[in-house]
Amino acid sequence: MNKERKTENLLLYNGRIYTQVPEAPFYQALGIAGGKIVWLGMDDELYQLPPDKFKIINLRGKTVLPSFFEAHMHFAFWAWSLGYIELSGCKSYQETLRAIKSRSQELERGQWLVGQGWFKDGWENPVWPHKKDLDRLVPNHPAVMMSRDQHAIWVNSRALLKAGIRADTPDPRGGEIVRDESGEPTGILKDTAAQQVYRIMKPPTDVRGSLLLKTAEMHAHSLGITGVASFDSIDGFRRVQSFHRKIGLKLRVSQFVPSDHLDELISLGIQSGFGDRFLRIQGVKYFADGALGSQTALMFQPYKGTKSDYGLALYDDDELKAEVKRCARSGLNVAIHAIGDRANRMALDAIIKAQGRSAGKFRNRIEHCQLLKKEDIERFGPHRIVGSVQPVQMPLDIDMIKKYWGRRGRYSYALKSMLRSGARLAFGSDAPIEPPNPLLNIYLAVSRHPRQTDKPFYPSERIRVEEAVFAHTYGGAYSVEQEKLFGSIKIGNFADLVILDKDLHCISPDQISHVEVLGTLLEGEFVYGKEYFQDW
Ligand SMILES: [Zn+2]
């Protein structure tokens, strides 16, 4: 649905405008009409424009970039998470229980109580939470509390019952149902064991869902984001479609459909790009392996401290090749989740085989690219494969990388090496795993210094500010084949822009994540910060 928007013509001047266009990287002034960029120049060239046709805004030296593109998130799932009880600020188990109690009164019939962010090692007296404490507070509704690192959930008896988890339920591969001495589940489910609960969790009602999607959209705007690549479930995608039909998205959403629906896509003849400029299908999402935390990422060499644990392959090489080939023949791009070095090899092999000699016709991506073999890094550039990475995950990953991968971690988050090979990078957060935060992403890519106490993590893989900004703007648009519409500041492109308080290129890296987003424009309309610029 393309709602016609009536927007004012704007003329922004006295700014520091970084275009992301190599041939013309910098301007001071910019004209917008009909939602698009119609003029670019320096302040002493403003006379070229008819002044009465534009509303004039003095940027007072502020910085303008193309608005940020968040290249990997789960939009609806993230929106739902904004309605969860936030437990990350709780300093003890008691405080955590109080926070849950305060929200347990307002539940409708059948509603799940969901919380997130508890972190026992950050409590005064670290103890594992127990289902019996949740049962006392929430006896009649299923309750699920997710840990901050997403590796454990704490549930009550009702949730266990609904998920069919009992004393005699075996641990799934890559997960653990924690039990007491008598074998009774304690309510803590680790890693893949949590899936059994996630699978049956009820999403919010339609009305509440729309409210949460609107909240998420506004939150994205406040971060300077106007576009996302979303990896929602079919239910999430359906909700986003309803929202778009009824209310109209003000966020560009490119959806990747889970691979178990490939047959439906093909039988309907749906190809990459189907939809409108706010909601479209961009491709198909595959999983080559699991995750590092549960040691299910697929490795060439066994995990440190094990003799034969190589992780988990979700496809064998030929199967994945056949799948990607089918997608390629059907006009569908793929995004393949790959964490371990062996999984990344498999994903690269499959994409390169399917693309054959026509890499230019495709926009295939690998999600996470977390650990690569040096020789595989070299393959991204020549085959035009997008590396979709999430530097914001670095702080929680580093300890695990050291513990499970040891020195192999050298080519983990190998951003500089990837760029050197000609890889196209696109930055994201994997929200709700981590909250979306482009400026933090940029800071971490530039500094690789996730915690004040540590040394930078393999500092030779640090990238420059302009490279990180590019990955969060043009790189993101490129990753969903939209770079001709937005992602750079160019005449004819949509005026999707972010205005920042400080120039990221001129401050010390540790200031970057503190820079304020002053305004966000979508097709020339302020979707955030309008009041701020009212009297400018
Ligand atoms: Zn994801």
Image: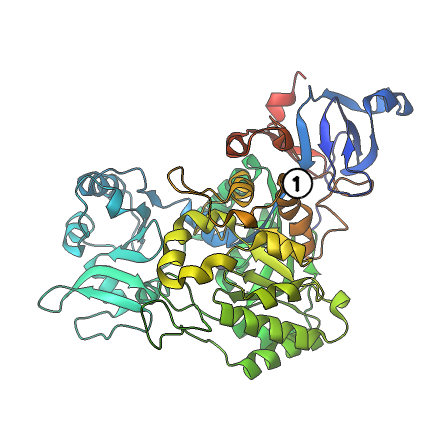
Q: Amino acid at mark 1?
A: Glu
Foreground pick, 73 / 341? 341
Foreground pick, 491 / 304? 304
Q: Residue at x 50, y 30 (%)?
A: 514
Where 511 falls versus 423 (above or below)? above
Foreground pick, 336 / 208? 336
Q: Report the side of 259 relative to 140 (left or right).
A: right
Q: Is residue 51 visible?
A: yes
Instruction: Identify the residue position indicated by label 1 in the image.
Output: 466
Residue 163 placed where, x, y %? Answer: 28, 67
Where 530 falls versus 378 (above or below)? above
Query: Dividing the picture into quarters, in which one does residue 332 lie?
Result: bottom right
Where 514 falls versus 441 (above or below)? above
Q: Residue at x 65, y 45 (%)?
A: 467
Q: Report the side of 369 relative to 113 (left or right).
A: right
Where 193 falls versus 440 (above or below)? below
Residue 206 placed where, x, y %? Answer: 46, 52
